[in-house]
Image (cartoon, helix red, strand yellow):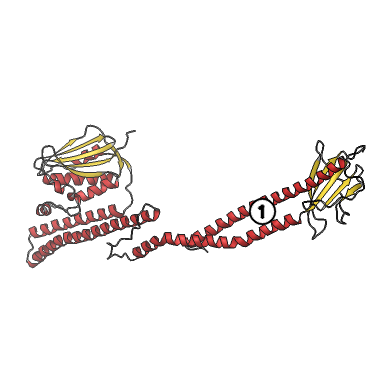
Amino acid sequence: MVRTVRARAAAAAALAMAAVLAAGGLWLYALLRANLLENTTGRTELAARKVAAQLDTRALPPGARMPAPESGVDLVLVRDGQGRTVNSTASAPKDSPDFGELRPGPGQDSRSAVLPAARPGAERRVVVVVESPGPPGAHDPHFVYAMTVLGDVDDATRAVAVGLLAGSPPLIAFAAALAWWVAGHALRPVTAIRTELAAVTASELDRRVPDPGGADEIAQLARTVNNTLDRLERSDARQRQFTADASHELRNPLAAVRSRLEVALAMDRPDRESVAAALADTERLQRIAADLLLLARLDGGPAPRTEPVDLALLAAEDAARRPHPRARLRLDARAPVPVAGDPARLERALANLVDNALRYARAEVVVRAAAEDGWAVLEVVDDGPGIPRADRDRVFERFVRLDADRGRASGGSGLGLAIAREIARAHGGDVRALPAPAGGARMVLRLPGRART
């Protein structure tokens, strides 16, 4: 079984060379044989016509012995219309065939044929018959038969066949060896890539495979592998940072809960305030754990299910669930905004954006839903302090809070905007932070629109 690329290339080259040699050899053999047979037939016919010309001019009297023909013709016979031999170059051999049935066709003065061997071990012969009016005064036409043994033709074609058979194996072997060498030379960068890639471990994700340069498939493979390693390294760094941030974020409320419970247990009668504070910290831990679980599902989970969703209706339902927000919440949605997505996840993304706006708004938060150029756009605008230009992309990173103390005091975990962006990207869209026209922050969620039916 051929297992390596080099072996497969060598085998393919050997098969291709064998096929070319077989086809070319058969063509050369047939062409050479046809040319030799044609030349032999022409010489035989020329000898027959010379005798026919002598017969027509009385230069060859009946019964006269003809001299040996030229050009390697073995036998010439002259027969009358009754098939009787009138002249011949020599005594007919014992295995000489009967030429009586070989005559030119209507409208023709000659005919040729290749006769098979008369017995095993004998040789084939080519016979040409030429019709002649005969000597002056003859009542019936005469026929001149010339015969040449094809021994030389058979020997020459046999020698060519033997030469082709003898020369084919070295050529096939050369083609296989050349393909083996070329494939090995071409695959040398692949070996280097494989060796370097095998050395990449979880602790050495910064290693990269060698790039051979150029624009061929192997160079593209090397660049693709390096790009994949880049993404893997970034993902690993992101995962490590996420784990560290999550551990830090969970450690603080756990320590607070423990200390409050220890203080409460140290009292004869635990005060209600300590238990309430411990309960609040526990609820915050639950929210963080739920957010972490959702992010884990967004990172490695399947694509969201899709069904018709109206962003304007989602925004109205979210506003209705907030009876007493700390800032006034106003909805601006003049028409349905249909999209295809997971209603629960899109509702979560909207709620996170609104929660973030309400956390920093001074007096008002505006939620707008509209369709623009084939996109469904949802904007959440607040009149708070806004987001500095340098931090407009960083706020979507996990556990990032521009005001850490205020975020913890208000219950924020730094995961809300990250979750909103992951949900948007899972639906083929994105979330961006932009400045509001009158100050504050403007979060814009864009999703591929869905035509209304």
Query: Where is residue 443 drawn, in percent x and y?
Result: 18, 43
Q: Is residue 151 above or below residue 306?
A: below
- Residue annotated with mark 1: 29
Q: How many dots with numbers? A: 1
- The residue depicted at 24 percent of the width and 59 percent of the height is 237
> Residue 186's image quarter?
bottom left
Residue nearer the viewer, 343 or 159: 159
Inspect the image, locate mark 1, and give the three-letter code of the amino acid beneath it. Tyr
Residue nearer the viewer, 69 or 334: 69
Element class at badge 1: helix
Query: Where is residue 144 drawn, in percent x and y?
Result: 85, 45
Residue nearer the viewer, 291 or 173: 173
Is 284 situated left or right of 345 in this image?
left
Residue nearer the viewer, 62 or 194: 62
Q: Residue reaching furthest bottom? A: 266
- The residue depicted at 44 percent of the width and 62 percent of the height is 184
Is 291 situated left or right of 181 in this image?
left
- The residue depicted at 22 percent of the width and 44 percent of the height is 431
> Residue 333's image quarter?
top left
Which quadrant: the C terminus? Answer: top left
Q: Residue reaching furthest top? A: 334
Query: Where is residue 236 drawn, in percent x and y?
Result: 26, 59
Is residue 102 among the parts visible in the rendering? no
